[in-house]
Amino acid sequence: MFERIARLASDLPDGSEITQRMGRAGLAHDGLTPSNFAAVPTLSKGKLAAVQEVADGFGPVLPFGGLAEVSRIFRSPGGTYDFAGAGPDYWGFAAYVKAAGIGPDDIAIVALAYQGTPGAFMFDEGLQSVGATVIPTGTMGSEAVLSLIQDLRPTVFVGTPSHLIGLIRRHEETGANWQGTMRLRAALLAGERLTDDVRVFLAERGVASWQAYGTAEAGLIGYECDVHSGLHVRSDILVEICDPATGQPRPDGEAGEVVVTIPRKVYPMLRLGTGDVSAFAGGECPCGRVEKRLVGILGRTDELTKVRGMFIHPRDIAVLAAEVRQAKRLWVEVHRDADGDDVRIVVEPMIDPHESGLFESVEQLFRQRCGLRGRVVVVPQGTGKDGALVRDMRSK
């Protein structure tokens, strides 16, 4: 992998964004090793637009390479440009499609937008690379898509979970049995969180659901196998889990920012910080694949609050608040005192906290979920206010 990264860097002009960051780390392209790789500063996804603005002419791509082999240019909602190279499966989605058991005998509806952003093309090219036939419905209305499903009998659906569920319910409202009248057997779902309830709903109708993780810049990053025990990292890229503040890799099992390196000729990426939070799963997957696995996407770095080397995520506090039924409101405040960070679990109770054993239970649940000690602070009933679930008071 590092030989490929070195070859990539050697082909880039001296003024490219990648060579500039390597230079700031005091590294030449032939000096990159696993031991010094983390010295190269990460590039935040949020800074891509600013990097692209400084280039001249066909500016958006020049900081990353030339335009000679670019086949498509996209503009993301955030104002950045994304680029695709020529050739089959540029975004690497074939591994995902194969893991879902899709091949030449399948017909797939791709119900994602083809205009502006690359998401639909990622799936489209991955499906075609394994010989599947693609029906590019894009963002056609539900009635039109349902008509195509009835007429052409596709076996695969690509799109959002809510779209597919809506199609199924619309069909079943007519009194028809979905599994008895349709051939759909697999759903490659994107754009929304895939919950256990959705998996069960689809499985009851003979549709196996699969999810993957990718970005417009990187393409496929990780994908599910048939065991559904995490996301296998794509074998031809490098993924690190890093401290969002320092860019340094974190030990396996600990959460941090997903940082990706894609050593390709068109639109290469070196230590791109995606802003997504994940962790590497432990142990080997029963499917036999040897690549590392991500546990899934746990949130975004801008949602995290770092305390004593650990991260508190609002999602964990939301779950905690739901578990503590005696609480009308519950949130976490992080203060600074003479001894360091003071974590307060603020509770507005529905009943007398002394009668409910609130102190002990909440502090224990918080420690189990977040790996940190915190102390309960009870505020009088009627004084709590809605707001962020995690409130960093250290700079106030």
Image (cartoon, helix red, strand yellow):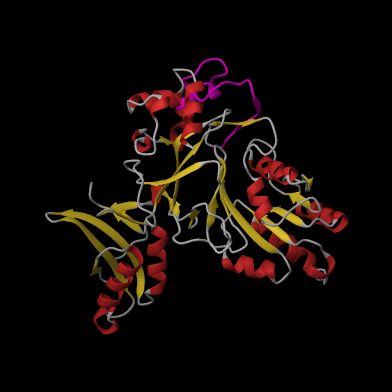
Residue 353, compared with residue 34, is above or below; it is below
Judge from the rendering whether residue 21 lies leftward or rightward of residue 71; answer left or right: left
> Does residue 312 belong to the magenta stretch?
no
The residue that appears at 64% across and 30% down in the rendered structure is: 85
Spot occupied by residue 58 in the image (x, y as percentages of width and height): 57, 18
Residue 283, compared with residue 103, is above or below; it is below
The part of the image, by quadrant, that contains residue 114 is top right
> Does residue 57 belong to the magenta stretch?
yes
Spot occupied by residue 310 in the image (x, y as percentages of width and height): 30, 55
Q: Nearer the viewer, residue 13 or 216?
A: 13
The residue that appears at 72% across and 49% down in the rendered structure is: 111
Judge from the rendering whether residue 275 lies leftward or rightward of residue 202; answer left or right: left
The residue that appears at 49% across and 53% down in the rendered structure is: 292
- The single residue placed furthest to the top in the displayed view is 57
Q: Nearer the viewer, residue 165 or 260?
A: 260
Spot occupied by residue 151 in the image (x, y as percentages of width and height): 88, 55
Residue 166, compared with residue 261, is above or below; it is below
Residue 95, compared with residue 269, is above or below; it is below
> Can I make out residue 297 in this image?
yes
- The single residue placed furthest to the left in the displayed view is 338
Spot occupied by residue 61 in the image (x, y as percentages of width and height): 55, 24
Q: Nearer the viewer, residue 77 or 7?
A: 7
The residue that appears at 68% across and 66% down in the rendered structure is: 202
The part of the image, by quadrant, that contains residue 255 is bottom left
Identify the magenta region: 51-77
Q: How many marks?
A: 0
